[in-house]
Amino acid sequence: MKKNLINIIRGLALYQIFGGILGIGLAIRIIQQLQHLNALSYPLIFLTAAFYVFSIVAGAVLLQHPKRGLTLSLVNQALQVLSIAVSSFAYNYVAGFKLGLGIDFVPAWQFNLNLSLSSFQLILNEATGRVFIGINFLALVLVYVIERLREEI
């Protein structure tokens, strides 16, 4: 494998490991601030941790087995491309950095530029009052890069 490809793969792997570790750290900090945990809180905490652990695993596998790791990395980045909130459902996942553009449709169309670090949001069956869709352009670019890398390997 070419040295340039190895460096790109290594950088992507370290980015995903960093994003996962950062996400777990931020999640632990937020959990410590929660005052009222209910029965639904624990599965959501587990799900949040699972997403970030998946990012770490994708990065670690990428370092050891690039072909298999690129598949995991593709899934990890694809999960981060779209953010959405509609009625009683909302989803946002970022492991690393987010450079995104979104449209908030309620009460009027408002375009938002989003810059953020690792974050996870999943809202089910709770009125958010938002209708929002967003694209994480960094994750979208990484999906493209990963697809090109898969063709090279």
Image (cartoon, grey):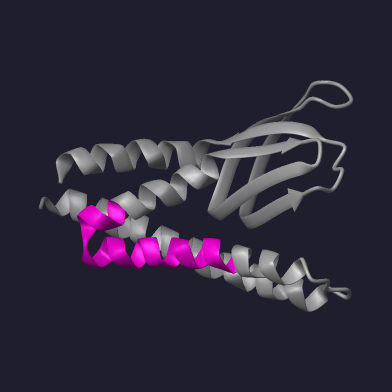
Q: In this view, does 20 lie to the left or right of 69?
A: right
Q: Which residue lies furthest to the top in this view?
A: 109
Q: How many labels does the image show?
A: 0
Q: Is the magenta stretch mostly helix, strand or loop?
A: helix
The one nearer the camera, 126 or 130, is 126
Asked if the magenta segment contains residue 96, the reply would be no
The one nearer the camera, 69 or 96, is 69
Q: Position of residue 94 (x, y in %)?
A: 57, 52
With respect to residue 120, does 86 lie above or below? above
- Magenta residues, start to end: 49-70
Q: Where is residue 121 in the image (x, y as percent from the top left)?
A: 69, 53
Q: Position of residue 89 (x, y in %)?
A: 75, 42
The one nearer the camera, 13 or 90, is 90
Q: Is residue 51 left or right of residue 35?
A: left
At a point 54% along the width and 66% down the height, the residue shown is 50
Q: Residue furthest left?
A: 1
